[in-house]
Each structure stands twice: as structure tokens, then as C-alpha cells.
Image (spheres, rainbow, N blue to C red):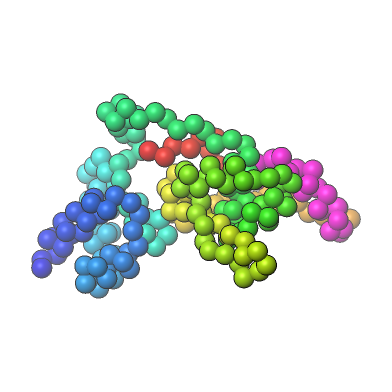
């Protein structure tokens, strides 16, 4: 198969899949070398960027996705008559930040930090596909653990968790760890990261 034909084949597959897919999985399914697949993805990405195409290739850690460009979201909504998603609440942002920076985490870990029940917030984030269940801990009760999803990366316009903004430092006063903990509790209501105030899942 010629290189151009392979590129077109990969483009068709990504269009048909319509969601993030692992590069390794693409290579295995197509029976191509993973390095070749990666090079073809680079070619597709350059082609879309050079021609200012209406679609683009997103890289989300070890996954890729073919999707429409953000600047055409308004027109796409008009055609599909899709309503803008409601913004996340302050509580949802706090829970999402705790998970993003500490994953995988349990519900009890999140509630220990926030001091309130997080069942409803976790359910909402799961429905929005911003977080996912990552299995269970080998502890009494077998608690579920949670982590972020590729959709989380896409929604917040980052390629990997390493691109998350750094958390502010809260140095202990007089070298006291207890003072540092008290300072953190005092600022518990603050949003721990610079996430945008609305989430666009288009």
C-alpha cells in the first residue's frame, strides 16, 4: 500500500471512530508499524494545519482524535441545534481539580479534603465523561478510585496532565506543618487551579 493511500486510510478510520483512540490500538488493528502510524498522524496534522482545514487532529496523551476546530463551534451548534452545556459549579471544579492533581483517588479522599459529601458532584462529572472509574482499591469495602478522561484533556485544551498549571505553594509559618495545614483548610473554598469557568464539550 502506498504512503498516500495509507494516510487516507488512517484519516477515514479516525473519522469513523469519532472518539479518542490509542495509537498502539490503531497500529495493531491496521497491522502497521507503530512508528509508521505516528509518522502518518504527523502528516495529517500538518496537512490540516497548513490548509486551515475545518477539522484538526488532537493528541491526548497516547490517544488521537479527529474533530472540528474550536473556531467553528458556533456554526456547528446552529446546524445541529445543540445547546451550550451549563457551566460547572464551584464544587465540581474543586472536585475535578482534586482528582486531576492526585489521581487515582477515592471518594473518601476527596471528601476528606472538601469536608462535604461529593456523591452528586462525582455523578455529574461521570455523566459529562470528565472523570472515569479506574477500578477498586484492595482495602476493606473495595472503594472505587477515580481519574480524569481523554475528554477532560480535550475540554480543557491540553495534550497531557503535565500541562496542568502548577498549584500555588502554601509554605508553613515558623516551619510548622500544623500551620501549613491550617492555612490550607482556611483556603479550602478557593479554586486550586486556573480552569476556565465554563466547559465547552462540543
Q: Where residue 77 sits in the image (x, y, percent)?
A: 33, 30
Q: Quadrant of residue 29?
A: bottom left
- Along the viewing direction, whichever of 164 and 154 lies nearer the viewer: 154
- Along the viewing direction, whichever of 95 and 156 lies nearer the viewer: 95
Compared with 126, 4 (above or below) is below
Q: Secondary structure of the magenta portion, mostly?
A: helix
Residue 196 as seen in the image, left or right of residue 150: right
Q: Residue at x 57, y 53 (%)?
A: 100
Q: Residue at x 69, y 50 (%)?
A: 111
Residue 150 as seen in the image, left or right of residue 115: left
- Along the viewing direction, whichever of 198 and 132 lies nearer the viewer: 132
Q: Residue at x 23, y 62 (%)?
A: 40
What residue occupies the far front of the structure in this picture? Answer: 141
Q: Residue at x 37, y 38 (%)?
A: 202
Specify whether residue 191 is painted magenta.
yes
Q: Is residue 163 in view from this perspective?
A: no
Q: Where residue 22 sits in the image (x, y, percent)?
A: 35, 62
Compared with 47, 62 (above or below) is below
- Along the viewing direction, whichever of 188 and 2 lies nearer the viewer: 188
Q: Is residue 87 in view from this perspective?
A: yes
Residue 173 as seen in the image, left or right of residue 91: right
Q: Where residue 2 sits in the image (x, y, percent)?
A: 10, 66
User: The N terminus lies in which quarter of the figure?
Assistant: bottom left
The segment highlighted magenta reads: 175-192
What residue occupies the far right of the structure in this picture? Answer: 174
Q: How many marks?
A: 0
Specify whether residue 141 is painted magenta.
no
Q: Where residue 24 sits in the image (x, y, percent)?
A: 32, 68
Amino acid at each position: 500500500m502506498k504512503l498516500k493511500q495509507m494516510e487516507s486510510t488512517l484519516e477515514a478510520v479516525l473519522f469513523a471512530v469519532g472518539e479518542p483512540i490509542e495509537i498502539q490500538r490503531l497500529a495493531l488493528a491496521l497491522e502497521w508499524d507503530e512508528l509508521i502510524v505516528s509518522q502518518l498522524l504527523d502528516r495529517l496534522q500538518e496537512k490540516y494545519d497548513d490548509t486551515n482545514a475545518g477539522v484538526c487532529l488532537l493528541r491526548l496523551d497516547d490517544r488521537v482524535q479527529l474533530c472540528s476546530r474550536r473556531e467553528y463551534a458556533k456554526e456547528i451548534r446552529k446546524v445541529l441545534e445543540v445547546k451550550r452545556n451549563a457551566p460547572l459549579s464551584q464544587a465540581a471544579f474543586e472536585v475535578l481539580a482534586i482528582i486531576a492533581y492526585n489521581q487515582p483517588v477515592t471518594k473518601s479522599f476527596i471528601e476528606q479534603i472538601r469536608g462535604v459529601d461529593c456523591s452528586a458532584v462525582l455523578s455529574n462529572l461521570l455523566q459529562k465523561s470528565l472523570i472515569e472509574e479506574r477500578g477498586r482499591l484492595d482495602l476493606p469495602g473495595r472503594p472505587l478510585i477515580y481519574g480524569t478522561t481523554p475528554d477532560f484533556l480535550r475540554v480543557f485544551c491540553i495534550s497531557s496532565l503535565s500541562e496542568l498549571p502548577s498549584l500555588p505553594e502554601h509554605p508553613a509559618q515558623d516551619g510548622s506543618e500544623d500551620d501549613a495545614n491550617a492555612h490550607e483548610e482556611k483556603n479550602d473554598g478557593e479554586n486550586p487551579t486556573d480552569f476556565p469557568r465554563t466547559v465547552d464539550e462540543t
